[in-house]
Image (cartoon, helix red, strand yellow):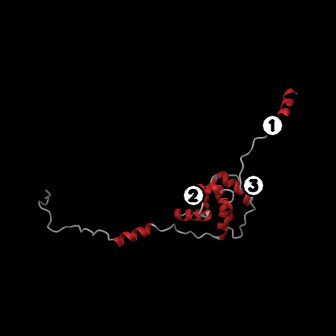
Amino acid sequence: RPRFPTALPSTPTTKLRPAPSTIDVYIDMSRRARSAPKVNVSPSVRLGLESIIEGNETAIRAMLSLGSDKVVVEGLIDCMGVNSLSAEMLIANYFSASMLGAYCRERIGKSDKGGAATLAERIAREWAKPSFAPLPAPADSKKRKEPQPPVEDAAAKRVAALA
């Protein structure tokens, strides 16, 4: 039959730590306040990021919650560093398939078919080449317009209905 102690031990079994000093708190706070880890990207990947931003800057700024004072390319690179993402993973996870398809078709001259992951892989493969140079941006890339429905001529419509 087990026996339980009837009295507590006279010496404490656990040691209490002293309260942290101001210096300890300052060191902990400075570690938390560090900026995002920087990612080294090749010049061709940086050029690719700059080219995908052209025409999509407002959407990317909104996606990253960037103010108007920060450079968008640096925001994307910071996002890659904080989340430990490669360029391919960044564009696959954060960009829509329609945006990537338009980029493939217009800026790198590749097929726009496939999902976001397929398109991101295709783009990243091009960006990885040291000789990467995007095609010139289309003239209307700065202001994307909604497709307009065709304007119908009322007189031509009446003639076609009567015939």
Name the residue nearer the viewer: 27 or 97.
Answer: 27
Residue reaching furthest top? 162
Q: Identity of the amino acid at label 3? A: Asp
- The secondary element bearing badge 2 is classed as helix
Dividing the picture into quadrants, the one containing residue 24 is bottom left
Name the residue nearer the viewer: 48 or 110.
Answer: 48
Is 117 situated above or below 40?
above
- The secondary element bearing badge 1 is classed as loop
Q: Identity of the amino acid at label 1? A: Glu
Residue reaching furthest front? 69
Name the residue nearer the viewer: 16 or 97.
Answer: 16
Quarter of the rendering occupied by the C terminus? top right
Residue 152, label in figure: 1
Is 10 situated above or below 55?
below
The answer to whether marks 2 and 1 mark residues whose Cβ atoms lie closer than 8 Å is no
Which residue is at a point 67% across and 51% down the rendered structure image? 98
Quarter of the rendering occupied by the N terminus? bottom left
Q: Position of residue 153 (x, y in %)?
A: 83, 36
Q: Which residue is mark 3?
A: 140
Which residue is at a point 23% across and 67% down the rendered structure image? 14
